[in-house]
Image (cartoon, grey):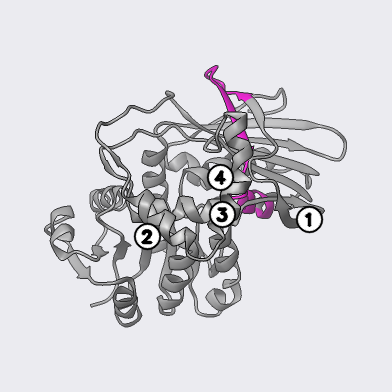
Amino acid sequence: MTGGIWVLGATGRVGREVVERLHRAGAEVVVAGRDRERLARVDPDARAVAGSLDEVCARLATEAPDVVVNTVGPFAVTGPRVARACPPGTHYVDVSDELSAFELLDGMDREAAATGRTLVPGAGFGVLGTEGILLHLLAGEDKPSRVRVDAIASVAVEPGALGDALAATIVHSLRDGGREVRRGRVVRARAGGAAERVTTPDGDVVTTASLGGGELFAAWRASGAPSVIGASALVPANPVLRAAVPAIGGVLRLPGVAGFATRRLARVTTTTARERPRRSSWGRARVEWPSGRVREGWLRTGEAMAFTVDAVTEVALRLAKGEGRPGAFTPARLLGPEVARAAGGEFVVTDSTGT
């Protein structure tokens, strides 16, 4: 059997909802994960592929899906493994936000192009939310000199354990440490640095700081600017806690510590649901040109995880329809900033020259 869209990690929060939306769109869906019984509860009518990641990858190589949606972290580990298992003509998309995952998949660009595959990391809120508004601001413009993007997620909390995938992604991001683009190169920077208090168009005041995730990589490649900062509201706003971020990253780089921390964090359980802290989630971009001209804009969406589900579903459906092109791309660089609107975002440009 060939074709269809495979969802890896189909029993997780994002995976479950992606399966539901793909079915609503009329796609042929295959659910994949470790537990066959849990897969059956996600969608009793979908074909299930149960097994370890290596076993699922072996099936990918022989069954040739149209698209593989990977929701299994840490993506710096799973992304290249799954992408390499995809046979010629099978496209790959994930919801990663780890800088190292983007760098590894970008290194597969020529290999993907030669085999007719499209690789799209970061089809989620942080990357698409910031990259979408950045490319909207840059339409028809010259190359800028400085860019800053800020991901301001508003996330509802579900009861239950944090889980292996999210825990691994958090730990890997902290272990990677801070990064910025200076003089056209990604360089180490202080994690939690470049802190800035920003006021959203809704009037919420939020502190963001740099960590160097997928937002940084996407903004750099989308703009070509020699100076880029990628910041997030997930970095602690408290100055004391923010100052501790580099030390935490250093500890996590010690042998065995990251694995231990991931296992402990995965078992952290929330007993009650919590509503999202703000009405909207925001992706912000601020662009400066050599002339000194500055533009700022925002992408507004609702709950950030819901946007992530809609974003990765939208990208997967477009890839299945043949709208991609061979190689490795971030989502808006491949499909244009309008893909962020198609996933439910709204552009809000706050300078006098924008619309």
> From the image, which quarter does the N terminus lie in?
bottom left
Which mark is first along the chain, 2 or 1? 2
Q: In this view, does 61 lie above or below 173?
A: below
SS at mark 4 in the image? loop
Is residue 182 rendered to the left or right of residue 195? right
Label ID, residue 251: 3
Q: Which residue lies furthest to the top in this view?
A: 203
Dot 4, crowdedness within 10 Å: few (<14), some or many (≥20)?
A: many
Q: Distance between the residues labelled 3 and 4?
A: 38 Å
- Which is nearer the N-term, disc 1 or disc 3? 1
Q: Position of residue 143 (x, y in %)?
A: 78, 47
Which tag, 4 or 2, sits closer to the chain's start?
2
Residue 297 lies, in percent from the top left, at: 63, 31
The disc at residue 226 is none
Real-space Cα separation, disc 1 to disc 3, in angstroms: 29 Å
Above or below residue 244? Residue 81 is below
Camera-near label (1 vs 4) is 1
Q: Nearer the viewer, residue 239 or 351?
A: 239
**Magenta segment: does it hold 205?**
yes
Amino acid residing under circle 4: Pro
Identify the residue at the far bottom of this view.
Answer: 62
Residue pointed to by mark 4: 337
Question: Looking at the image, is mark 1 or mark 4 earlier in the sequence?
Answer: 1
Mark 4 or 2, closer to the camera: 2
Please identify, in this view, whether the residue under mark 1 or under mark 3 is nearer the observer. 3
Q: Mark 2 and mark 4 in contact (Cβ < 8 Å)?
A: no
Label drawn at residue 184:
1
For the record, the magenta segment spans 198-221
Q: Nearer the viewer, residue 49 or 241?
A: 241
Q: Where is residue 67 in the image (x, y as percent from the top left)?
A: 37, 66
